[in-house]
Amino acid sequence: MDRKDWPLFEIFIRPKNGLSHKHVGSLHAADTRMALDNARDVYTRRGEGVSIWAVPAASIAASDPSEKASLFDPADDKVYRHPTFYDIPADVKNI
Amino acid sequence: MYTQALDAKTEQGAQPSPRLVTEQEAALQSRFQERVDAEEKIEPRDWMPEGYRRTLVRQISQHAHSEIVGMLPEGNWITRAPTLRRKVALLAKVQDEGGHGLYLYSAAETLGVSRDELIGQLLSGKAKYSSIFNYPTPTWADIGAIGWLVDGAAIMNQVPLCRCSYGPYARAMVRICREESFHQRQGYELMLALAQGTPEQKRMAQDALNRWWWPSLMMFGPSDEQSAHSAQNMAWKIKRFSNDELRQRFVDATVPQAEFLGLTIPDPELRFNAETGHYEFGAIDWTEFNEILKGNGPCNRERIEARRKAWDDGAWVREAAVAHAAKRRQRALKKAG
């Protein structure tokens, strides 16, 4: 086995202009250029997209799943973040 | 193309004996099961039981190998397809199978194994792949039978995998299933053309059905009583339906399709049970299946040799790609410097 030099790339595809790039999978390639070429062949055989991002997987910083509870607390106690928290007289329109 | 339950009960003795679990681990395990029961997806960096990880690595990599080896029987006919229309379709299908292998290797890698490790297991003969790809494709009708029956069985098995509890596997399966339905339709259309052709063509179609029918039924794996991991895999929601349930669905869907073709399913015991609404079929010859898994099928050696040759012949391409990438980096540095 001799592919130690082929890093992993995460592939993101924009389905059409106006939409964001979305993660579709990953692949190994010698460099970014090859990653883009291969992503085109592997992930866009049926008109899936108009733009590809290839990001070295090692460059992605990810949050720790064990901190999910504290990081992504639904903040249900912070009701003042929602518009319904504020009392506006019924006579006031367009607000 | 396909994943198969390859592990029969005899292998159970080889499994590590249960060890004592700590209180903390037990809590993690019950929390994990709660999430699975609630149909929450498990993602790569989430805590998971070691057995769950091991099962998934084995199943996803076997599935990936099956896609890659599955390119071989059909690749055999690309240069000899009878028309350009059939040729482009077959070429696109085989290219899809290669892509499916890559989606699946990617999914397996999220569980902490490397691509090269998995490919090494295939080339060394250590890893298993679907038994179906160890049969030869001597006639053009085999291409039709593979699309219709083998991909048909694969779809039956794979659609429930789109709801598998492990996120990356489920997402790969969604893509694969979307692409797979063209495979089955092109196969059936091919069979239809032969079945409605000259008597010789119809004989060829019947002969292919005779050879592929039973191996296709075996694709669903051992019967439920013989299947080693079924109960645990169901609890983990890796598997949604039992081997026998899926096999029955396949038979029910396929028999009327064969009737439409005017071909005969090679099973004298096959009959429709009006009470249950299902077809009853004869006993499967599991000795043949077990022999193939042991490496003694008609094409086992040929398939692995072909993969080894492809890997060895491609060595210079992999080296050249690395050298070229290094050169491009140097050039970019010089330009910037």
Image: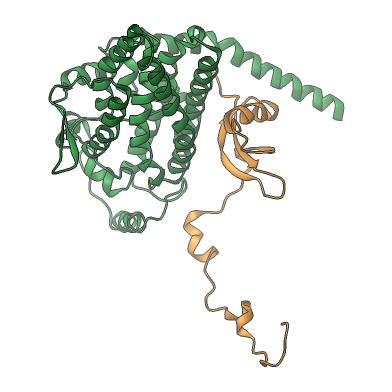
Looking at the picture, how far across and down is residue B320, in whole percent? Answer: 65, 14
Query: Can residue B112 be seen?
Result: no
In the drawing, does residue B36 fall left or right of residue B71? left
Colour scheme shown: by chain
Q: Visible in this render: residue B277? A: yes
Vertical relation: B16 (above or below) B237? above
In this picture, is B201 found above or below B330? above
Please name whichever residue, B289 or A26, is drawn nearer the observer in this view of the structure: B289
Q: Quadrant of residue B250?
A: top left
Residue B181 in the image, given as x and y percentages of width and height? 44, 33
Which sits in the foreground, B301 or B185? B185
* Number of residue marks: 0
* Residue positioned 61% across, 48% down in the render: A61
Colour of chain B in the rendered structure image? green
According to the rendering, which colour does chain A have?
orange
Q: In which quadrant of the rendered view does residue B121 lie?
A: top left
Residue in the picture at 53% in, 8% down: B313
Q: In this view, does B80 lie to the left or right of A16?
A: left
B276 relative to B39 in the view: left or right? left
Residue A31, given in percent of the width and then of the height, sits at 67, 27
Front residue of A14 and B199: B199
What residue appears at the point 28 percent right and 24 percent down from the top-left corner?
Answer: B216
Compared with residue B177, is residue B137 higher up or lower down, i.e. above or below? Answer: above
Left or right, residue B268 beside residue A70: left
Spot occupied by residue A47 in the image (x, y as percentages of width and height)? 63, 35
Rendered residue at 49%/11% (across/down)? B78
Tell me the quarter of the image containing the C terminus of chain A. Answer: bottom right
